[in-house]
Image (spheres, rainbow, N blue to C red):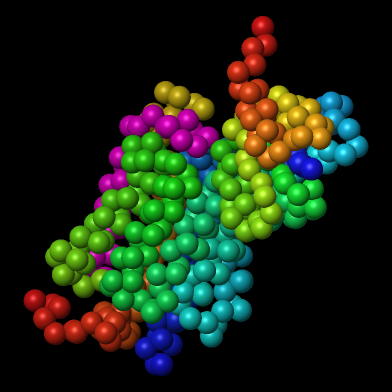
Amino acid sequence: MVGILVVSHSLKAAEGICEIAAQMGNADVPIVPVGGGPDGSIGTSVNDISAALDELGDADTVVILVDLGSAVLNAETALDQFEGEAAIADAPILEGALNATIEATSSKATLESVVSSAEEASELSKV
Amino acid sequence: MEKTDRQREAVFAAIENVAARLAEAKPYLTELDSAIGDADHGSNMDRGFETVVEKIEEERDSDIDDIIKAVGVALISEVGGAAGPLYGGSIMHASDQLSEGLTPESTVAFGEAYLEKLTDRGGASVGDKTMVDAVTPAVHTYKKSIENDDLPAQEALAKAVDAARRGVEFTVPLRANKGRASYLGWRSVGHKDPGAASTLLILEAILESAEDSLDESDLEQDATSPTIPDEGKEE
């Protein structure tokens, strides 16, 4: 099973994105939000990301969706210390999370297939 | 043994001096980061090094490399923003080079490993208007001063600080290609990069401490590895 971790500078944004994505998923796909800096301000925290990864680690593999620069760097730093299987998708955070969630509901979903579904969101045209 | 103790004291003094310098410079870094970023670099660095000073108290009897590693770990968990993983991750990675203590050679290796991790993680090159623009000339100048010019470590460090200072000035007319400032496009031109500026502040504080330590205990002799012959080094 593939779990999904949404990392935003704002916990509210991460929670909202998870809510939207969860509508497309099912109870089997865990989607976890994480956001805010070490002091609770706008930012991201390596420790919070590590804790969320460990929580999701039970899902076998984790695909991470990120927003801006330091979310990527802090997620990479957390991955250095994570022993499970996980990857960061190079995708827009909301649409990527949506695509990833849909793919993750498939019984054939793998880390690669979920990452690649998330990354297809880069090519979505809205208007 | 005595040598290790003195090096450890010098390292603690340098870290505390860095923390003090960053606390003092908090408004300055905030101002720089307000212009082209998210205005949190001053408070992030100040909070990060405040935590560093607390955490290294547990390392009073540790080896130099473990003290430096603890600095990196504290910065990673406390700084937030991009500066946490960039400073903390690079320091952690480079700390392995100091397993034999502080020597001209080990500190060159530290600088090179730091720069390697920094560019690898951040993906920035010289000219992208980031801390890489201060770190690269500093590391290159330090290495050249030690390896080619046979300068004492402290003089080499002074030259590295000058190089970093020019690197910070070099960021002013650049358009940012990395980090939050890159979202501003051309509006990032004409401002100093905050990460380059904090790098310079840290190097200045380390140099200041090194000068103090030298006055007191002849650090240069101290800083020469026993495995490397002293003779002829000053020629």
Identify the residue at horizontal 39%, vertical 60% (top origin): B113
Where does residue B212 sit, x and y in percent of width and height?
34, 76
What segment carries the magenta color? B154-182
Of all residues, the one furthest to the right in this rendering is: A27
Left or right for B201, reference A76: left
Tell which of B39 and B182 is nearer to you. Answer: B182
Of all residues, the one furthest to the top in this rendering is: A127
Left or right for B90, reference B213: right
Where does residue A70 sit, x and y in percent of width and height?
58, 42
Is residue B166 visible in the rendered image? The answer is yes
Residue B64 is covered by the magenta coloring: no
Tell which of B153 and A87 is nearer to you. Answer: A87
The prevailing secondary structure element of the residues shown in magenta is helix
Of all residues, the one furthest to the front in this rendering is: A108
Of all residues, the one furthest to the left in this rendering is: B235
Decide: is B166 above or below A124.
below
**In the rendered view of the protein, which quadrant contains the N terminus of chain B?**
bottom left
**Number of marks present in the image shown:** 0
Identify the residue at horizontal 46%, vertical 35% (top origin): B178
In which quadrant of the rendered view does residue B145 lie?
Answer: bottom left
Where does residue B130 sit, x and y in percent of width and height?
41, 42
Identify the residue at horizontal 53%, vertical 35% (top origin): B180
Residue B161 is covered by the magenta coloring: yes
**In the rendered view of the protein, which quadrant contains the C terminus of chain B?**
bottom left
Identify the residue at horizontal 87%, vertical 27% (top origin): A23
Is residue A41 visible in the rendered image? The answer is no
Left or right for B25, reference B208: right
Where does residue A69 sit, x and y in percent of width and height?
56, 38
Left or right for B203, reference B155: right
Decide: is B28 above or below B172.
below
Decide: is A116 above or below A60.
above
